[in-house]
Image (cartoon, rainbow, N blue to C red):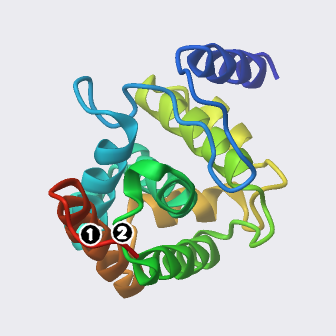
């Protein structure tokens, strides 16, 4: 229980580092989750495209797989709501939403779970795994956000299968973001 409280406090304190409020569709992601010198948006796009490109990229590294889930929870709302991404085609957002639902189904994440709860759980899981606190990591996976037993979810994250929808959606998001930043056409 103490480890869960510490993980929650760490997540809340990390949340204080950012400046933009979360919305119902777009969860808050603390700075630095996807790299020290990358903003959250481009870091999430690049990381998700890399992570979902091949199962080998996150194999035996459930903390990295959890970060990929964080990115996929974040991107559909951010690309839809932020004026920065107005040039990204709506079909990219729809595909990201479909990929998020597919990944949730594979990991046993409730389809109706708010994205912020999923992000909080995955960030806490990743921090606990990186610090070697297996007991706290397993405690995070007992959250009502998850429908599978903790061992099953952790096993899937450790050996994330190839998820075609996530690979194609994140690759298209990466291409769409690059085109948008370079002055591509609007929606």
- Work out whether residue 102 or residue 139 is closer to the camera in this orientation and state it: 102
Q: Which percent across, then down, holds residue 61?
A: 34, 49
Quarter holding the N terminus is top right
Up-down relation of residue 42 to residue 171 (above or below): above
Instruction: Evaluate if marks 2 and 1 touch, with contact meaning CB atoms under 8 Å apart.
Output: yes
Q: Is residue 166 visible?
A: yes
Up-down relation of residue 42 to residue 115 (above or below): above
Q: Which percent across, then down, holds residue 180?
A: 25, 61
Alpha carbon separation for disc pair 2 and 1:
5 Å
Q: What number is the disc on residue 157?
A: none
Q: Which percent across, then down, holds residue 45?
A: 32, 55
**Residue labelled with disc 1:** 176
Q: Residue at x 36, y 77 (%)?
A: 169
Q: Which residue is drawn at 34% across and 66% down?
A: 87
- Work out whether residue 43 or residue 143 is closer to the camera in this orientation and state it: 43
Instruction: Tell whether 27 sits left or right of 51.
Output: right
Quarter holding the C terminus is bottom left
Up-down relation of residue 160 to residue 11 (above or below): below
**Residue labelled with disc 2:** 88
- Work out whether residue 158 or residue 10 is closer to the camera in this orientation and state it: 10
Q: Residue at x 84, y 54 (%)?
A: 144
Instruction: Classify 10 Å Cα crowding around label 1: few (below 14), some (14-19), many (20 and above).
Output: many
Instruction: Classify 10 Å Cα crowding around label 2: few (below 14), some (14-19), many (20 and above).
Output: many
Q: Can residue 162 be seen in this view?
A: no
């Amino acid at each position: 229980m103490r480890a869960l409280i510490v993980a929650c406090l760490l997540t809340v304190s990390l949340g204080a580092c950012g400046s933009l409020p979360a919305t119902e569709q777009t969860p808050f992601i603390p700075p630095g989750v996807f790299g020290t010198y990358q903003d959250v948006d481009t870091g999430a796009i690049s990381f998700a495209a890399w992570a979902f490109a091949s199962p080998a990229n996150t194999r035996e590294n459930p903390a990295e797989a959890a970060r990929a889930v964080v990115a996929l929870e974040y991107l559909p709302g951010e690309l839809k709501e932020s004026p920065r991404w107005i040039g990204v085609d709506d079909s990219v957002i729809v595909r990201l939403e479909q990929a998020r639902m597919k990944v949730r189904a594979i990991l046993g994440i409730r389809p109706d779970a708010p994205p912020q709860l999923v992000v909080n759980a995955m960030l806490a899981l990743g921090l606990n795994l990186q610090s070697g606190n297996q007991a706290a990591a397993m405690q995070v996976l007992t959250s009502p956000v998850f429908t599978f037993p903790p061992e099953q979810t952790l096993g899937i994250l450790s050996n994330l299968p190839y998820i075609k929808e996530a690979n194609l959606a994140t690759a298209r998001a990466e291409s769409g973001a690059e085109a948008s930043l370079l002055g591509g056409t609007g929606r």
